[in-house]
Amino acid sequence: MQLSKEAVLAEANLVFKGTLMETLNIEMIDYGNDFLIARMPVNSRVYQPDGVLHGGATAALAESVGSFASHIFLDTEKFFVRGIEITANHLKSVTEGFVYAKATFLHKGRTTQLLDIKVTDDHGNLVSVCRLSTISLPKNK
């Protein structure tokens, strides 16, 4: 039985309880056949000392959405997913509102996956461009 979009997103957000994603208030908000979108509020929790969005928080958002995209688009009955490399190029500062991370696959292999993650602000401005490599490993070996 295939779950509804709302059920998948609710399950994703429930899994985040007690984790870094909950600490940063990261929330999965939409997905389709080839993408997943998450958002994170920009406030003092994710600021650098000078009051702008911390690049590490942006990278955590990107890795969260990318890893979870691999998780929901692969057979997680047999495999678990781990991030193995992330790069982030930060292009614009943000001081308030939300940032949105949209993960899309560049490569969806059986063992490794490569995702492109674009992070934008409330106005659609590009904030960061990230790449995430993930690996799928067998659960029972």
Image (cartoon, rainbow, N blue to C red):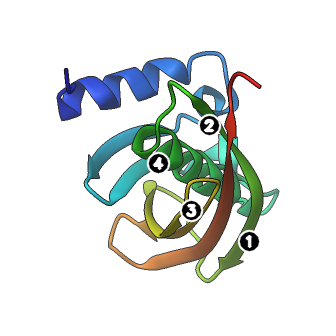
Determine the image quadrant of residue 82: top right
Q: Identify which residue, 130 or 91, lies in the foreground.
A: 130
Amino acid beneath label 2: Leu
Looking at marks 2 and 1 on the same chain, the residue that comes earlier in the sequence is marked by 2
Residue 73 picture location, percent across and down? 41, 45
Please give the label number shown on residue 95: 3
Q: Tell me the residue that label 2 is attached to.
A: 24
Q: Tell me which amino acid carries mark 4.
A: Ala
Q: Nearer the viewer, residue 79 or 21?
A: 79
Query: In the image, which is nearer the foreground, mark 3 or mark 2?
Result: 2
Q: Say what secondary structure mark 4 lies in.
A: helix
In the displayed structure, 107 sits above or below 46; it is: below
Sequence-wise, which precedes: disc 1 or disc 4? 4
Disc 1 to disc 3, how far (Cα)?
22 Å
Comparing marks 4 and 3, which lies closer to the viewer? 4
The residue located at (46%, 43%) in the rendering is 74
Q: Position of residue 85 (x, y in %)?
A: 78, 62
Dot label at residue 87: 1
Tag 2 secondary structure: loop
What residue is rendered at 47% in x and 48% in y? 69
Q: Residues within 10 Å of mark 2 (few under 14, many from 20)?
A: some
User: How far across and down, in percent of the image, does residue 102 sit?
Assistant: 42, 62
Badge 4 is on which residue? 69
Helix, strand or loop at label 3? It is loop
Mark 4: few/some/many CA within 10 Å (<14, 14-19, 20+): many
Which amino acid, mark 3? Thr
Indicate whether 120 appears above or below 33: below
Return the disc, 1 or 3, that comes first in the chain's sequence.
1
